[in-house]
Amino acid sequence: MTLSAGTDSVRQSLASFRQEREADWKAFEALLARVEKRPPRALSEDELLSLPLLYRSALSSLSVARATSLDSALIAYLEALCLRGYFYLYGARRSLRTRIGDFFLHDWPAAIRDLWREVWTSVGLTVIGAIAGYWLVGADKRWYDAIIAPSLAGGRNPDSSAEALRSVLYGGGDHFLSGFAAYLFTHNTQVSILAFALGFAFAVPSVLIILMNGCMLGAIFQIYAAKGLGFELGGWLSIHGTTELFAIAIAGAAGMRIGTSIAFPGELTRMAAAARAGRVAATAMIGVTVMLLFAGLLEGIGRQTITSDLARYSIGGGMLALWISYFYLLRMVRHGDR
C-alpha cells in the first residue's frame, strides 16, 4: 500500500512538473526549429529576446529533473533540447559562403606555407627526375619505352618524325583533350592522388612517384628536343603544366608530411602525429583538386586554341606567378602593412 502511494506521488509530481513547464519547452523547441532552418531575421524582436530566457528555463528544468530523478526519457529530451540551444546561442555559426571564403583566404594558403619544406623537396625531386629521364633517353632511346608505356605514348616515340611531333603541338582547336594531352591530364591527376594516398608508407612511395613523374617529363622533352622542338613543347605544356605540376608537387608534399610524421613522430604517438599532419595535408589536397580543375580548363580550352609560343609561355608563367603570389607573397604584403 505504501509503495503504491509512493508511486502515485511520483507520477503526480512528474505530471505537475510537465504541466508547469512543458509549454516553455515546446516554445523553445519551435523557435530553435525555425532559426536552424532560416536566418535569425525571420524571427520577431520579441521572439529573439525570448530565446535566451527559454534556454535558461530549459536548463533549470533539466537541473530539477536530474536532481529529483524524474523520468529518464524526459531527462534525455531536456538534455538534447539544451544542447541544441547551447550550440545555437553560443556556438560559432558560419555560413557556407563564410566557410568557403575562410578556406581560400586563410586555410589553404596557410597549409601550403606550412608544407613549404616538403613542397620544395617535391619540386627538387621533379627536376632531378626530369634530368635523369632526359639523359637516359638521350643516351639510349630504348629507355623511352621503359619509362613511358607505348600504349600511353599515343604513337609518339624517338623515331617519330618532326612533322608528326609538331602536329601534336599545333593541331588546332577541334581536338580538345585528345591524344597526348588527354593522357597527360589523366596521368597527372592519378599521380597527384597516388603521391598523397601512399605517403603513409614512410613517404617512400610519394618520393618514388614524384621522381618517376619527373623522369617521364624529361623523356618527353628529350624526343622533342632531339627534333628541334624543345622550346615549342615547353610552351605547349606550360599553359596548363605550371599549374598541374605545382599541384602534383603539393600532393607529393602532403604525402611526405604524413609519411615523415609517422616515421619520426617525436614526442607524440604515431597515430597522434599522423592525425596532426593529416589535417594540414587534407586541407592542401582539397586545394590541389581546385588547381587540377583549373589545369583541366586551361588544357582543354587554351592549349589547343592558342598556338602562339609567346602567348603560351605568357599564360603558363602568369599562372605560376599567380600561385606563388597567392601562397607566399601576398601574406608578406599583409604582414608588412600591419
Image (tube, grey):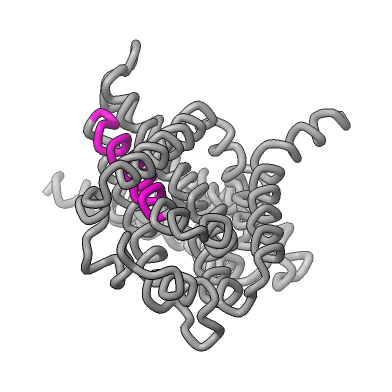
Residue shown at 56%/50% (left/top)?
A: 57
Foreground pick, 127 / 160: 160
| Quadrant hosting residue 109 | top right
Q: Is residue 19 above or below residue 75?
A: below
Tally of numbered tags: 0
Q: Name the residue at 58% across, 53% down.
A: 88
Question: Considering only vertical position in the picture, is 327 above or below 8?
Answer: above
Tell me, yes or no, whether the highlighted magenta stretch contains residue 214.
yes
Taking depth in this image into account, of 25 and 211 the one nearest to the observer is 211
- In the foreground, 285 or 71: 285
Whether residue 52 appears in magenta in the rendering, the answer is no
Query: Bounds of the magenta span?
Result: 202-220
| 204 up-or-down from 47: above or below | above
Q: Position of residue 243 (x, y in %)?
A: 55, 54
Left or right side of 197 for 188: right
Q: Position of residue 218 (x, y in %)?
A: 40, 47
Identify the residue shown where x is 25% and y is 42%.
198
Q: Left of 135 or right of it: where is 85?
A: right
The residue shown at (49%, 35%) is 119
Please state the horizontal and vertical placement of residue 94, each as a whole percent of the image: 62, 54
- Residue at the right extreme? 337
Quarter location, residue 257? top left
Front-lying residue, 125 or 130: 130
- Which secondary structure is most common in the magenta stretch? helix
Residue 292 image point, x, y percent? 49, 60
Residue that extends furthest to the bottom in the rendered view of this protein: 174
Quarter that holds the C terminus: top right
Seen as rendered, the residue at the extreme top is 267
Q: Let me know if residue 9 appears in the view.
A: no
- Outermost residue toward the left? 1
> Does any portion of residue 257 appear in the rendered image?
yes
